[in-house]
Amino acid sequence: MYLCLCKGITESEVREAGQAGIVMPCQLKAKFGLKDPGCCGRCSKNIQEFAQIAMSVHQTPSPNSVRS
Ligand code: FES
């Protein structure tokens, strides 16, 4: 799924960035050039969604989900 149509950034690219330790909104904006001229800025408004996806690669399953 595309998160940014102007740059063609996909969800999996954002996950890869997260695996590389790029999880903060400002880091993601810089990595994907979301402040560059020519970008519409729509995805910048959804940068929290980028951050959530990037961080999701670091989340471990909840202890409650472990069977006893
Ligand atoms: S949709 Fe990402 S800059 Fe336009």
Image (cartoon, grey):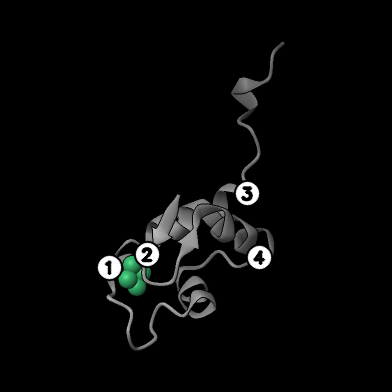
In the rendered structure, find residue 21 and report the number of the disc placed on it: 4
Ligand 1 is within 8 Å of the C-beta of the residue at disc 2: yes
Q: Position of residue 3 (x, y in %)?
A: 41, 58
Numbered disc 3: secondary structure? loop
Query: In terms of image quadrants, where is residue 25?
Result: bottom left
Residue 51 falls left or right of residue 43: right
Question: What residue did someone put label 1 on?
Answer: 42
Mark 1 or 4 closer to N-term? 4
Residue at the disc numbered 2: 5
Q: Residue visible at 57% across and 60% down?
A: 13
Which image quadrant is residue 65 in? top right
The answer to whether the beta carbon of the residue marked 1 is less than 8 Å from any atom of ligand 1 is yes
Cα–Cα gap, marks 1 and 4:
24 Å
User: Disc 3 marks which residue?
Assistant: 57
Residue lying at 41% horizontally and 77% vertically, measured from the top left: 34
State the residue at coordinates (47%, 53%). Answer: 52
In the image, residue 66 sits, relative to residue 12, either above or below, namely above
The residue mark sitting in front, 3 or 1, is 1
Q: Residue furthest top?
A: 68
**Mark whose residue sits in front, 3 or 2:** 2
Direction right: furthest residue: 68
Amino acid at pointer 2: Leu
Q: Earlier in the sequence, mark 1 or mark 2?
A: 2
Q: Nearer the viewer, mark 4 or mark 2?
A: 2
CB-based contact (under 8 Å), mark 1 and mark 2? yes
Using the image, tell me which numbered label, if any, was put on residue 58.
Answer: none
Residue 60 is situated, as x and y percent measured from the top left of the image, at: 66, 39
